[in-house]
Image (spheres, coloured by chain):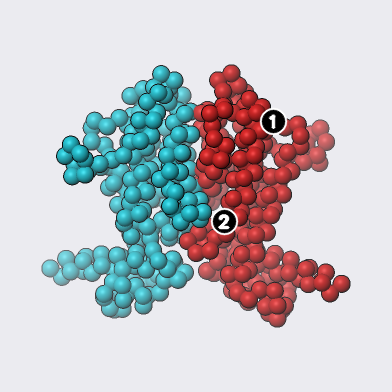
Chain colours: A red, B cyan
Amino acid sequence: MVQERAVETRNQIVHGAAEVFDTEGFAGASIGMIVAAAGTTRGALHFHFRTKEELAKAVMEEQGLRELAAIQKLDDGKTPAIEQVVMLAHEMVRLTKNDPVVRAGVRLSLELTFVDSPKEPYLGCIMACEEMIRRAIMEGDIIDTVSPPILARFTISAFMGVQLVSTVLTERRDLEQRVDEMWDTILLGIMPGRRRRKADQVRAARWCSAAESPAG
Amino acid sequence: MVQERAVETRNQIVHGAAEVFDTEGFAGASIGMIVAAAGTTRGALHFHFRTKEELAKAVMEEQGLRELAAIQKLDDGKTPAIEQVVMLAHEMVRLTKNDPVVRAGVRLSLELTFVDSPKEPYLGCIMACEEMIRRAIMEGDIIDTVSPPILARFTISAFMGVQLVSTVLTERRDLEQRVDEMWDTILLGIMPGRRRRKADQVRAARWCSAAESPAG
């Protein structure tokens, strides 16, 4: 029971930290603000985390886990893999919009790029994307001269850049449109000629939960 | 004469600030460090800049000007525009490696994405790239169904993301290779079939100054 409560307190602190990092950024956040947002005490916080850096790391780790969970959900065993690749980017947009932990993690990753940005969230997304690309090649929707690790790394990198530029230029208001345009450009080069007429359908692929789906 | 000296002092301060921001980042830099790096006095610094934010802005403005100057140099009146687009990304890599002002500007842009990142350096690069894409379409090297503003914004965004991920995963060691891979993917979709056999040549395009060129 004591351990359960400790896990709960730690979660509460990570959520409070995410809220503060999301609005204040790494430099602007203070331990005092995080204690207040988490509704805990300074003592409880210091029992779990020694520094603001450790808190930031915990938020980015949680971000990575949530992104991976969202990505794993995409493989329902019937959606073509190429549509899953497209959905992946849109799921990440959706998470960034709706989940303050993911949003805080994205902000921290950028702000700490040159200091202490953990590689795992990037590598996790790249590996998941690579796996989808391999399946899409087997399904005949991506040309087999493409290298899955290279295309996966480029796709995730390009998505990060699209998110970055959309944030600076429009505070993310045009993000979904820019992700569609990203797919317009990338799909044009990687789909075999005979499949390319279904590129519009692929580009429009979105994940729906059973609850959200019109058929559900 | 007094005015000339003031301009020189301001330049000296911007350079000192760039050196400090480059190694310490925005949060880690202090006015004291910048005064020392610039070899000036606190009074002189405060005559030109009131806050660290203003110093960061001046460094990012100078970064934008240097990038634009490098981009303008690419149009020598004989290099095909599509090769100029490829060169653009490599010139930005070269500047980031060799010029501490540009490197500091790139770091500050990322760290201040959510606070006060000026739009101008991004917009300047996007517009220059758009102009090159328009010319490449006229020269028959890019298919005419491509929208120049959309492809330009995506190309600059993708490049920023490639730079970001390369920084996190390898401290930029694999950056040139990743930029080559970016062009492999993008060129595949935008070059007309009949021109695609020269894609390797286009991808390898680099700008040489007269002094560096073997023919010069």
Q: Secondary structure at mark 1?
A: loop
Q: Which image quarter holds the N terminus of chain A?
A: bottom right
Q: Which residue lies under the disc numbered 1?
A: A80
In the displayed structure image, the side of residue B212 where residue B186 appears, left or right = right
Q: Is residue B75 visible?
A: yes
Tag 1: amino acid: Pro
Tag 2: amino acid: Lys
Label 2 and label 1: CA atoms lie apart by 29 Å
Up/down of B46 relative to B208, above or below: below
Residue at 36 percent of width and 31 percent of height: B202
Q: Which quadrant would residue B132 be assigned to in this image?
A: top left
Discs 2 and 1 lie in a common subunit: yes
Q: Which quadrant would residue B193 be assigned to in this image?
A: top left
Q: Picture coordinates of residue B12 (x, y %)? A: 25, 67
Q: Chain of mark 1?
A: A
In this view, the residue farthest toward the left is B1
Q: Which image quarter holds the C terminus of chain A?
A: top right
Up/down of A87 relative to B142, above or below: below
In the displayed structure image, the side of residue A14 where residue B137 appears, left or right = left
Residue at 76 percent of width and 34 percent of height: A77
Q: Secondary structure at mark 2?
A: loop
Residue at 41 percent of width and 24 percent of height: B196
In this view, the residue farthest toward the bottom is A43
Front position in the image: A54 or B120: A54
Q: Picture coordinates of residue B123 (x, y %)? A: 40, 46
Mark 1 closeness class: few <14, some 14–19, many ≥20 residues within 10 Å? some
Q: Picture coordinates of residue A18 (x, y %)? A: 65, 63
Q: Which residue lies under the disc numbered 2?
A: A119
Q: Is residue B82 visible?
A: no
Mark 2 closeness class: few <14, some 14–19, many ≥20 residues within 10 Å? some
Front position in the image: A88 or B125: A88
